[in-house]
Image (cartoon, rainbow, N blue to C red):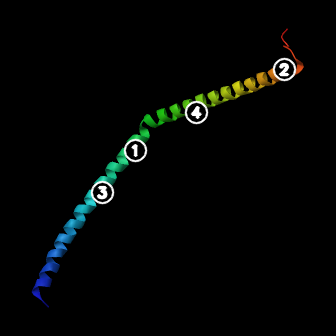
Amino acid sequence: MNNQYVRREVFCRNTCHELKRFWEREIGKQTYYRESEEHRLGRSALGKLREEWKQKLETKLRLRNNSDETEKRATVGQASLTQEDTKHGGNSTM
């Protein structure tokens, strides 16, 4: 066997273990930071505030849409009354 390959194998064993250990530690740190950030955000009031604002906006939109529909009905009702008045040849208010 060639000595060049044996040396690389011996050199690689130590280096590979060191590299593996290094990256395992880095991955562990990143996992810890990510989990602590998720935990911190979970305790944060920001999510609760966003949900409350979302509900308020949805309520306002529903009310606005309902009032728009009511106005349309009123407009359609007035238009039908006006058409009836013109058919009968006069104003019903007189």
Residue type at mark 2? Thr
Which sits earlier in the primary sequence, circle 1 or circle 4? 1
Asked if the residue at tag 4 contacts the one at tag 1, i.e. Cβ–Cβ closer than 8 Å, the answer is no
Vertical relation: 5 (above or below) 27:
below
Give the CA distance from mark 4 to mark 2.
42 Å
Q: Dot 3 corresponds to which residue?
A: 28
Which sits earlier in the primary sequence, circle 1 or circle 3? 3
Asked if the residue at tag 2 contacts the one at tag 4, i.e. Cβ–Cβ closer than 8 Å, the answer is no
Which residue: 82% across, 21% down? Answer: 81
Residue type at mark 1? His
Q: Position of residue 57 (x, y in %)?
A: 55, 31
Give the CA distance from mark 3 to mark 2.
82 Å
Q: Dot 4 corresponds to which residue?
A: 58
Classed neighbour count for the residue bearing mark 3: other residues with Cα under 10 Å, few (<14), some (14–19), many (≥20): few
Give the CA distance from mark 1 to mark 3.
16 Å
Q: Dot 2 corresponds to which residue?
A: 86
Which SS class for mark 1? helix
- Nearest to the eye among marks 3 and 2: give it: 2
Q: Quadrant of the C terminus?
A: top right
Query: Is 20 displayed left or right of 92 in the figure?
Result: left
Query: Is 91 displayed left or right of 61 in the figure?
Result: right
Q: Which residue is farthest left?
A: 3
Which residue: 47% across, 32% down? Answer: 49
Give the CA distance from mark 4 to mark 3.
42 Å
Q: Nearer the viewer, residue 50 or 26?
A: 50
Residue type at mark 4? Glu
Q: Dot 1 corresponds to which residue?
A: 39
Q: Position of residue 33 (x, y in %)?
A: 32, 49
* Quadrant assignment, res 42: top left
Q: Which residue is farthest top?
A: 94
